[in-house]
Image (cartoon, rainbow, N blue to C red):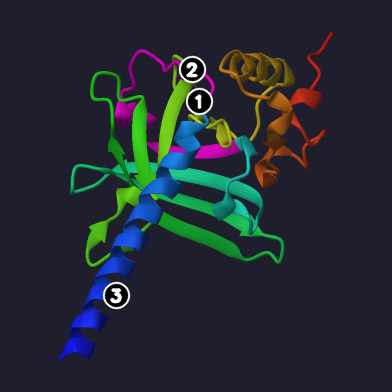
Amino acid sequence: MSSTADTRRRGAAGVRRFVLCAIAAAAAPIAVARTPLQTVPHIDLDRYAGRWYEIATIPAFFQRKCARDTTAEYRRGDDGMLVVVNSCTRADGGREDIEGRARVADPATNARLEVTFVRALGTWWFVFGGDYVVVGLDPDYQWALVAHPSRKYGWILARTPSLPPALLVELGARLAAQDYDACAFLLTAQSGSGGPPPVPRLCDVAAPR
């Protein structure tokens, strides 16, 4: 009897430690943020939906298998959240796809979202998710700058597989104004862009003279 009680106590303690560690891990990137991110004033989520091509990124851990052709697709879900589907091509030519959910964290602007790809017991677990903050958006929704408070992650997205060099230079400056290091962004190879990126880093892109 005592052995069973001890086992239950140890199990409960293990669960508590697991939960505390998970919360600490989720909160840690936010704690190192240098300055608050400045979001765009408002996002129409219906216009934001659809396919986006990744133009440049500070690669996240879940992108470690991606070699090229990284895209993200968003659509309204029946549960009121956004369905998120990230796809890419691996170095061996195979495809990687992962589905998640995004929920609005700032209804006044819709520019701050929480995204998770962890689903268990029929529930999407946002405690294991991350922040998705839109800090730049084309008036016609043709490109977007997505940030994370830690500045450890970031994305330049576009409706087309490539963007003009002059625009990339401008977007790099916008990210620098948000306390990002533009040299941390790597350009993503997209098959529809006419070939591999001419330079590996965003800060190496030169505006046409």
> Left or right of 152: which side holds 196?
right
Asked if labels 3 and 1 touch by Cβ distance under 8 angstroms, the answer is no
The percent position of residue 28, horizontal first and vertical second, equals 47, 41
Circle nearer the N terminus (2, 1): 2
Q: Quadrant of residue 114?
A: top left
183 up-or-down from 115: above or below:
above
Residue situated in front as seen by the camera: 33 or 106: 33
Between circles 1 and 3, the one closer to the viewer is 3
Mark seen at residue 10: 3
Asked if labels 1 and 2 touch by Cβ distance under 8 angstroms, the answer is yes
Q: Residues within 10 Å of mark 1 (few under 14, many from 20)?
A: many
Q: Residue at x 65, y 26 (%)?
A: 163
Q: Quadrant of residue 160?
A: top right
The percent position of residue 89, horizontal first and vertical second, equals 63, 57
Which residue is labeled 1 in the image? 144
93 up-or-down from 160: above or below:
below
Which residue is labeled 2 in the image? 138
Q: CA distance from mark 2 to mark 1?
A: 6 Å
Which stretch did the figure color magenta?
34-54
- What secondary structure is marked by label 3? helix
The percent position of residue 38, horizontal first and vertical second, equals 45, 15
Q: CA distance from mark 1 to mark 3?
A: 48 Å
Residue situated in front as seen by the camera: 151 or 70: 151
Q: Residue at x 54, y 22 (%)?
A: 34
Q: Name the amino acid, label 1.
A: Ala
Q: Residue at x 68, y 21 (%)?
A: 168
> Left or right of 101: which side holds 134?
right
- What secondary structure is marked by label 1? strand
